[in-house]
Amino acid sequence: MSEAPLLTVRNLRVTFPGDEGDFVAVRCISFTLGRERLGIVGESGSGKSTTGRAVMGLVGHPGRVEADEMRLGDTDLLRLDERGFRRLRGKRVAMILQDPKYSLDPVMSVGHQIAETHRCHFGSNAKAARTAALEMLAAVHIRDPERVYGLYPHQVSGGMGQRVMIAMMLIAGPDLLIADEPTSALDVTVQHQVLAIMDDLVRSRGMGLILISHNLHLVSAFCDRVLVMYAGRVVETCVASRLSEARHPYTRGLLASLPELGRRRTELPQLQRDPAWAAP
Amino acid sequence: MILLEQVTVRYGSGAGRITAASDVSFEVAEGEAFGMVGESGSGKSTVLRAIAGLIPHAEGRVTLDGREMQGHRTRAARKMVQMVFQDPYGSLHPNQTVDQTLSMPVAIHHLGDTDRRVSAVLQEVGLGREHRYRYPHQLSGGQRQRVAIARALILEPRILLLDEPTSALDVSVQAEILNLLARLRRDHRLTLLMVSHDLAVIAHLCERIAVMSHGGVIEVTTADALAAGTVTHPYTRQLLRSNRGFDRSGAEIVDVAS
């Protein structure tokens, strides 16, 4: 890739102090992201969500974020204060979380929530924000935007709620979208509709996407490149379509422990963890 | 072992009445592992609950081990059918130790010999003595699910109902739990009835699989047929595609009613 990377992360460390010493959630990870789809996979506690949150400036006190370099376009994220991050979030980098039931405001209609984002970032008036929100709802394939605009989160299905989230996140035109398990709370058939919509929008707008997931099949089929995380470290980076040829024993162990249609085994191989994987 | 004949379950009354499962019929032989797949709201958990006796069925017949279940169940009938729930975070009492959680069913069913039973069942599900006096929050997700399985197993049931037993777990832990369930089934000649949205998980453990949608069984197929892709119903085929990672063709909407 000849153009400058969208996101550069060099030696990112995230530490949470605790009673028994510091807990290091992310240990010296480095990656760059262009206008591509990058997957981050790993088990719970591997630091994949914390990495996404660090980029958004969402690691709260008393967590500490340190890095040699963390840059979004020409913005140095390490020098940004809370005000700076507030301007950045939504406008240049946006995040979609797992469950729309919990991440949407329950007492505000979904249309208002989308319009609010528009007003915050563009200072637009109510009418312009509403028009933009309706356009955005149509862009995420919602058939009757006028009707859905007035619905409250409890009145929409999981798949529709997640499309509302995507609409809200993309309305300010960010360069980077971080999707943290965006479809794990959805039924499999709905998952694919939501992913297809997200994919179309990200491609047509030339955005970068980080997809955080524990689902190896999904990431391998959807992304261009995959980082495999274990105990706060990136143990392997590979081309997504070649995830099945991964070489690291951790990745191989994860893949082997998945039950597979058409390959019946009386016993599934269990992952034998090697302490050396967590070492530098 | 399990025989369902035209079972219908409804919730609520009057205008708000919902038929969650309608006209569900299937038979599971002793020692068999039977699976149910479908999306949320397809009625698969409702069917499990009707078999467990947690909710009454409005119509049809539920027969377990040759005896029809109606209204109030005897203690022996309840002991025979035990259930493992999806989320071990939610299904274990947060203020009770593993020991208390496991002793309670023994006391309710007057089985006696609590101490020996608890330590035997813990060993069986692969937990050590050090876990016995811990609280749920001091255990990992996989260990918690082992406790939930132990809780069901301690009553020596003949039928084990599993409602998404691994969907809250990491894949490496999922493999451990699936291996444990397969071993328990062999050792105790358990009849398993498992609900999941993951076709690969279901096909790993079960020989026959019912596909559910909108409260009804639309197809009963086998794990081999799923693997070979020789399923007939378009909805099942779409589920199959969706389970093979991201694929544009999985995104099209198949209307089951048609």
Image: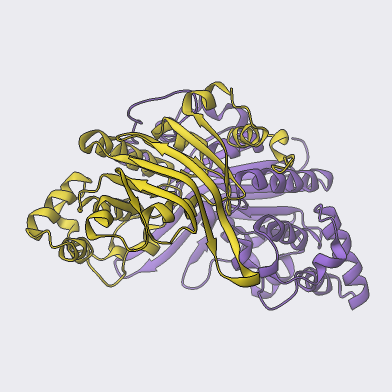
In the picture, which quadrant includes the C terminus of chain B?
A: top right
Frontmost residue, A127 versus B90: B90
Q: Residue at x 68, y 78 (%)?
A: A107
Return the x and y of residue A113 as percentages of the image width and height.
76, 72
The image shows residue B110, relative to residue B160, as above or below, that is below
What shade has chain B been given?
yellow
Would you say residue A214 is visible in this rendering? Answer: no
How many marks the image carries: the answer is 0
Return the x and y of residue A175 as percentages of the image width and height.
76, 53
Return the x and y of residue A11 as percentages of the image width and height.
52, 50
Q: What is the quadrant of residue A219 in the picture?
A: top right
Instruction: Indicate left or right for A266 with A51 as reference.
Output: left
In the picture, which quadrant includes the N terminus of chain B?
A: top left
The image shows residue A190, relative to residue B9, as above or below, that is above
The way the protein has been coloured in the rendering is by chain
Q: Residue at x 49, y 42 (%)?
A: B25
Return the x and y of residue B247 as percentages of the image width and height.
68, 34
Q: What is the quadrant of residue B219 in the picture?
A: top right
Would you say residue A39 is visible in this rendering? Answer: yes
What shade has chain A been given?
purple
Frontmost residue, A23 versus B241: B241
Frontmost residue, A179 versus A164: A164
Q: What is the quadrant of residue B49 in the picture?
A: bottom left
Instruction: Indicate left or right for A149 with B133 as reference.
Output: right
Q: Residue at x 46, y 72 (%)?
A: A62
